[in-house]
């Protein structure tokens, strides 16, 4: 490997994921996954995407990273708020003293 890509090492083995542009033999973008278990042979898998497929994959991964980094947002339910009063209206006791029922 040339050292580029997303590298992950664990006790189970090593994994490298690469996404690269290629011209030959078929133009497009290549996603390759190289895996070497701690015990066993290395395995290499690749798939070539056209431009539209690569863009869709990029968008899906980009949006998924939000959830990977920050988790699924939790909806916080709040108790219903008290009815709001008009900030410019005088308090009820002043309205009653002035003889204004509104």
Image (cartoon, rainbow, N blue to C red):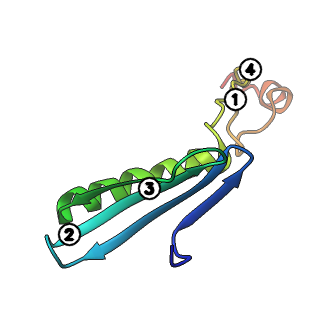
Which of 78/10 is in front? Answer: 10
* Visible residue check, residue 29: yes
How crowded pointer 4 is (Cα within 10 Å; few <14, some 14-19, many 20+) is rated as few
User: Mark 3 or 1 closer to N-term?
Assistant: 3
Q: Nearer the viewer, mark 4 or mark 3?
A: 3
Residue with the mark numbered 2: 28
Residue with the mark numbered 3: 33
Residue with the mark numbered 4: 79
How crowded pointer 1 is (Cα within 10 Å; few <14, some 14-19, many 20+) is rated as few
Q: Give the x, y percent position of residue 45.
A: 37, 53
Is residue 31 found left or right of 51 in the rendered image? right
Q: Give the x, y percent position of residue 17.
A: 48, 60
Mark pair 4, 1: CA separation: 10 Å
Q: Please report the residue visible at 60 percent of the width from the left and 63 percent of the height from the top.
A: 7
Q: Give the x, y percent position of residue 4.
A: 52, 75
Mark pair 4, 3: CA separation: 49 Å
Q: Nearer the viewer, mark 4 or mark 2?
A: 2
Mark pair 4, 2: CA separation: 53 Å
């Amino acid at each position: 490997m040339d050292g580029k890509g997303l590298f992950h090492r664990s006790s189970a083995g090593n994994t490298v994921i690469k996404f690269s542009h290629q011209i030959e033999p078929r133009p497009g973008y290549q996603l390759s996954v190289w895996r070497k278990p701690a015990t066993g042979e290395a395995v290499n898998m690749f798939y070539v995407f056209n431009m539209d497929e690569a863009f869709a994959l990029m968008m899906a991964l980009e949006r998924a990273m939000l959830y990977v980094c920050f988790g699924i947002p939790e909806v916080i339910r709040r108790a219903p708020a008290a009815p709001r009063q008009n900030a410019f209206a005088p308090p009820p006791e002043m309205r009653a003293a002035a003889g204004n029922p509104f």
